[in-house]
Structures are given as C-alpha cells and as structure tokens.
Image (tube, rainbow, N blue to C red):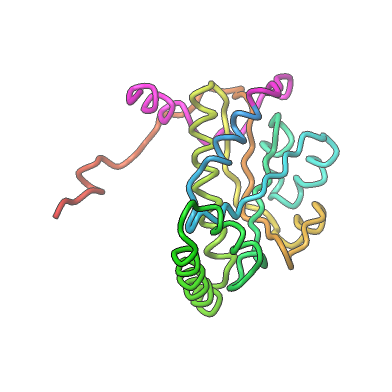
Amino acid sequence: MKNAFIRAMHYRHACKLFDENREIGKSEMEAVLEFGRLSPSSFGMEPWRFLVVRDRKLKESLQPLCWNQPQITTCSDLVIIKSIVAPLAPGSEYSRSMLSRRDLPKEKIEAYFKIYDDFSAHKLATEGLFCWSSRQCYIAAANMMTGAAMMGIDSCPIEGFEKEKAEALLDIDPAHEELALMVAFGYRVNEAPEKIRLPLDEIVEYR
C-alpha cells in the first residue's frame, strides 16, 4: 500500500493540457468525488460542495475568467469546489445538525456546541469563516487528486480565477457559498516533467 501511494504521488502533477478526446468514466469520476467526500474536516463540518462541470460551452465561458488556462476547456471534468460560509456561523442549525451526528451523551453534545460556537465566533471575528472553511476544501482537493492519480487520472488544482465573476457565472450565492478552488481532471497529452522537491532533511526536524 505504501509503495502504491508513493507511485501515485510521483504520477500526479499539475497537468496543464488534457486529451480532449478522452472522458473520465462515470464510475471513475464518482470514485474521485467519493475521495473528497470522505476527507477529514475541522469539527467534521464537511464544508465542501462539489459542482462538476462537463458542459463544453460552460467551460468556454469560464476560461476567460481563469486566465485563459487551457486545462479549463481540455479537461474531462472540471470540479468547482465551493465552500459553505453562512451555515458555519456560531449557533447555526447546520453546525448543530453536524455535531449531533456523534453517538455521544447529550451533555457532551452540548459541550461540543459551546466549543464550536466559541471557535467559530473567533474565526468570524479574526480571519472570517471563508478563510477557515476554504482550507478544509484543500484537504478534500488533495485527496481527490491523489486518489485520481492512483487510478491513472490526471489533475490540476486551479486558484487563478476571477472569483466574483466566476461565482456569478456559476450562480453561486456568496451569502451562502463561495468559490474556494477548482480542480481539472482528465488524461494527459504530454509526459509529466521531472518531479522536483526539496529533500526530507531540509524540510523535517525532530524534537
């Protein structure tokens, strides 16, 4: 299992150009989305929502808002990862519902409510809920990309876009959700460049 994971990590790269003639099968794409769904999130809030764009015309409309990057229109599936915002507010019905799923005594659930409300109120006052929520979306995106690589599917994470214009085009209501990032999935045209990373001894320390 370790070797298979390492191979997938080496296989994965930010694919800039996909084979437009190859589509990802339905079951394979559902598996990729499942990798995202099963990802961990702070307080188990699962703040991600996935919009899968396969329509050619919609991709073409999005491309100018994404710095005209070719992966937008050449990919098989463009996953728009939205981050919920308002439902994460302190005392929200959504947070209560998510925390109540735990099989715990009532008093412990109530304690979780208090901890979450204090935490989310602090986030709201300091960095904003979207900043915190979108970080959880990156965890899901990473799992989706690595899982896709294990199936021989290529990907490219995309942050380069005009957020407000893209949200308007996709009918995303920023009062409830915001665009966190996009991930393009498909099959590569060109071989991946050599993977260059710093060695472990330059990035890891033990204490």
Identified at 54% across, 59% down, the residue is 99
Give the x, y percent position of residue 190: 57, 23
Up-down relation of residue 42 to residue 124 (above or below): above
Q: Quadrant of the N terminus?
A: top left
The residue positioned 19% from the left and 51% from the top of the image is 205
Q: Residue at x 82, y 34 (%)?
A: 56
Can you say whether 51 is above or below 118 in the image? above
Q: Residue furthest right?
A: 57
Foreground pick, 76 / 196: 76
The quarter of the picture where residue 200 lies is top left
Q: Quadrant of the C terminus?
A: bottom left
Give the camera-side residue of 90 and 55.
Answer: 90
Q: Residue at x 55, y 53 (%)?
A: 101
Q: Locate residue 50, reporting x and y percent.
A: 68, 45
42 in magenta:
no
Pinpoint residue 42: horizontal percent, then vertical percent.
48, 57
Residue 35 percent across, percent down from the top left: 54, 35
Residue at the extreme bottom of the image, as rendered: 125
Stretch in magenta = 1-28
Res 178 quadrant in image: bottom right
Residue 7, magenta (yes or no): yes
Q: Nearer the viewer, residue 92 or 144?
A: 92
In this picture, residue 163 sits left or right of residue 204: right
Establish if 201 lies above or below 7: below
User: How many discs mark residues in the rendered view?
Assistant: 0
Q: Residue furthest left?
A: 207
